[in-house]
Amino acid sequence: MGKELSTREENYSEWYNELVVKADLAEHSAVKGCMVIKPYGYAIWEKMQQALDKMFKDTGHVNAYFPLFIPKSFFSKEASHVAGFAKECAVVTHYRLKTAEDGSIVVDETAKLDEELIVRPTSETIIWNTYKGWIQSYRDLPILVNQWANVVRWEMRTRLFLRTTEFLWQEGHTAHATADEAIAETEQMLNVYADFAEQWMAVPVIKGIKTANERFAGAIETYCIESLMQDGKALQAGTSHFLGQNFAKAFDVKFANKEGKQDFVWATSWGVSTRLMGALVMSHSDDKGLVLPPKLAPFQVVIVPIYKGDEQLAQINEVANKMKKAMEAKGISVKYDNRDNQRPGWKFAEYELKGVPVRIAIGGRDLENGTVEVARRDTLEKETLLQADIENKIEHLLQQIQDNLFQKALAMREAKTYHADSYEEFKKILDETPGFVMAHWDGTSETEQKIKEETKATIRCIPLNNKKEEGKCIYSGKPSNQRVVFAKAY
């Protein structure tokens, strides 16, 4: 089949890159730094979208769409925001092409834009400029809007799903009458993301707050969920920002409060992107290929017939289609693969590579005995089950697989979470057994920056509800009242 993967042990990075391509999730495109998300990968993203979209709507949010292009002048209105994104912006300067004398296509120099347009790296500026026309009074608040979109952040070193110049995401942008309401919204959305990661992706996360160095450009507070991959590197899986009145002041968005006084609106923004696909692949997959949690698998069960001759295939077809119908009535997605151009062994390897949670094989002997062979992708265990009541057995099995993947990922994270009390110990852990390192920090940006420069490790977050504990900063020796989470990250 030509589908042998590198192993995680040999080269984790190579294993990931190969797996994304060989499992048909995505591929590099002709546009440098951009990817093509293939149908199988996009089907997983659609499942993520559907689940998140429902969670957003269940918490009172509605979807809208804002322009891809943002006037350059909008960025200069919020100084810290533009500073944070300036080096990543793609800029549109002209609006027309023309044919040169030699027949080549060139930019028409006479078609220069009066004001350059930025291809959105994020939409705070265009949205807050728009909200100015939507908000006059407290009666217009809150505004709870989400946008599903693509964004562009120019990248020099790219990696499928994890870091590409263009990626897909959702971005929520909300407006509130009080700071307390905005903070409650920020925390609520962080909890939505954590629930999605743990209950759908089967990925355990730490909820926390970013340090000033790692905060979103233009935010007062950035909340995040941090996950740990099998190689001991952290991956930020979602962020939710309390923006205070920064953008309202930049775009002069005021409202008349209940007392009739003018006040600036309070804002939040929050988002997750297709890098969740990278987190999904790296959290659960093995050296044989993808391992997908049932809730996000494009199809949860594949049925493969093993037959001799058309007559036996016809009999198996009848049994398989009946089982498929019974499982689908339970809400289970099933693919019956009775193509005759590939052998069963090839199909088994293909579905193993693609991470299908459950594989059912039916052969001639199974027809006689009223049985099927059931293989689960997470543990690679096989068992023979009776065809009768198969839909209930598979429903139960899928839940078991979902739970098992979460517990396995949680056990891995716990095994790779360390405590360091000295800088030597800290560096040794990062070099030899990377993971989350819980260590004391003096609270200064200078110390954080020096640790990052010397070890490439960043403070992933200050965990919410963190246990207070007196100690000394591993770098400066100054007093500290809590440990924070350090790690090298994607």
Image (tube, rainbow, N blue to C red):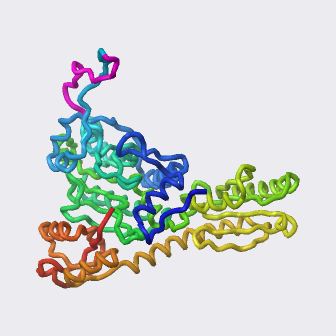
Q: Residue at x 59, y 73 (%)?
A: 379
Q: Residue at x 46, y 55 (%)?
A: 55
| Residue 136 seen by the camera | no
Picture quadrant where residue 446 is located: bottom left
Give the number of marks.
0
Q: Nearer the viewer, residue 468 or 58?
A: 468
Q: Position of residue 441 (x, y in %)?
A: 18, 76
Residue 116 on the magenta span: yes
Whether 100 is among the magenta residues is no
Please provide the residue range marked out in magenta: 102-117
**For this view, does 219 lie left or right of residue 197?**
left
Residue occupying image coordinates x 64% and y 74% = 381
Residue at horizontal 20%, vertical 67%?
A: 452
330 vs 369, left or right, is left
Give the image quarter of residue 106: top left
Quadrant containing the C terminus in the rendered view? bottom left
Which quadrant of the rendered structure holds the N terminus? Answer: bottom right
- The x and y percentages for residue 475 are 15, 77
Residue 353 in the image: above or below residue 444: above
Q: Answer above or below: position of 423 versus 119.
A: below
